[in-house]
Image (cartoon, helix red, strand yellow):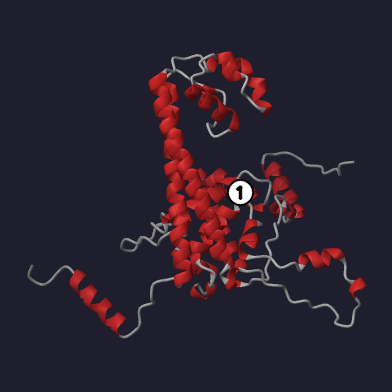
Amino acid sequence: MPGRSKTDKLDAVWLAKLTEKGLVRPSFVPPKEIRTLRDYTRMRSDLTVERTRYWLRMEKLLEDSLIKVTAVSSRLTTASIRDMIEALIAGERDPRVLAELARGRMRAKIPALLEALTGRFDDHHAELAAMLLAQIDGLETQITKLTTRIEQLLEDLPAAQAQREPDNSDVHASPDDHLEGAAISRRALSAVERLDDIPGISPAVAHVILAEVGLDMKRFPTAGHLVSWAKLSPRTIQSGAKSPTGGRTGKGNPYLKGVLGQAAAVASRTDSFLGERYRRIVKRRGKLKALVAIARSILVIIWHLLADPTTRYFDLGADYHANRVDKDKKIRTHVRQLEALGLTVTLTSAA
């Protein structure tokens, strides 16, 4: 087109010149050890998703044969339901015999199990169910093997090992003067153990986070840089003079965002600072945005824990915001609102 109205080529030339002069910030490329660890954690995540798919196929097969055990048990992965499926594959069709295989708290649901296990499960269902169980067991073996390998790789990383906190106590003090609690607080913890203290994060989730983020936080000068790299902060979307707030987050690392979303969902149900923060945000922003906010808070905590190996996670408590309320200011606000309605307010202290 005459005039070269589109600037795509001009922008590309400008970016190429900036890169040539070293003015473009390089992308984050973790060291070889972290990349190797990342391959193992990503493979484990993919196999876990595949295992879930096979369990869903198993549920569909049972539903096709009118075996409604998922109406009694929320999961097929329990030991009781596994024993019942294996008995069905072995040729047992009597609902009473199958229901008696229930264990623990599941035995209280035997009457419901009798009705749920009354179906038309036949030989071809048994053959297909045996194939699905074999696939699930094979995936389970591979996942366990990968987990063991991931733990070994983390043990071989010096930065992931326990770093003892500096002891600032008096060097002339005798060992008897130290309290047991102080010794426990100075106990060296590995990176996985320190991340495990955060509500919602398990060792398996910590493995994925360390593999995706790395252990060297010098790559991210601040926690905000890490949050922005993970695409957990709102994007700036400007059109002319308009700059709307509350933009959507970008498409970041799917493995990192996935486990952070899981951790945020678990933390939202806890009686902790993160759980209370979720309940405060969800009232005005909705569930999805509240989960993203909690995932962002968790990633900020992770940055601080990895930036300083001697740092420990300390939960502020679910009553953190309630304890910081200025009671006198709140009383004056309520009195002013009542007086605006034409009421006379007399304050009396509760006994």
Write the residue at 47% across / 24% down.
Answer: 89
Write the residue at 59% across / 46% down.
Answer: 266
Q: Secondary structure at mark 1?
A: helix
Write the residue at 36% across / 60% down.
Answer: 237
Which image quarter holds the N terminus?
bottom left
Dot 1 alpha-carbon crowd within 10 angstroms: few under 14, some 14 to 19, many 20 or more = many
Residue situated in front as seen by the camera: 81 or 49 = 81
Q: Residue furthest front?
A: 90
For the question of whether residue 124 can be seen, the reply is yes
Residue situated in front as seen by the camera: 158 or 173 = 158
Q: Quadrant of residue 43?
A: bottom left
For disc 1, the marked residue is: 267
Q: Residue furthest left?
A: 2
Q: Position of residue 144 (x, y in %)?
A: 53, 50
> Is residue 4 toward the left or the right of residue 243 in the image?
left
Q: Position of residue 310 (x, y in %)?
A: 68, 71
As shown in the figure, which amino acid type bears the numbered disc 1? Answer: Ala
> Is residue 13 toward the left or the right of residue 244 in the image?
left
For the question of whether residue 228 can be seen, the reply is no
> Is residue 38 toward the left or the right of residue 279 in the image?
left
For the image, the number of numbered tags is 1
Which image quarter holds the C terminus?
top right
Q: Position of residue 152 (x, y in %)?
A: 56, 62
- Above or below residue 218? Residue 49 is above
Q: Position of residue 157 (x, y in %)?
A: 56, 70
- Above or below residue 208? Residue 124 is above
Write the residue at 56% across / 65% down.
Answer: 154
> Is residue 345 toward the left or the right of residue 6 in the image?
right
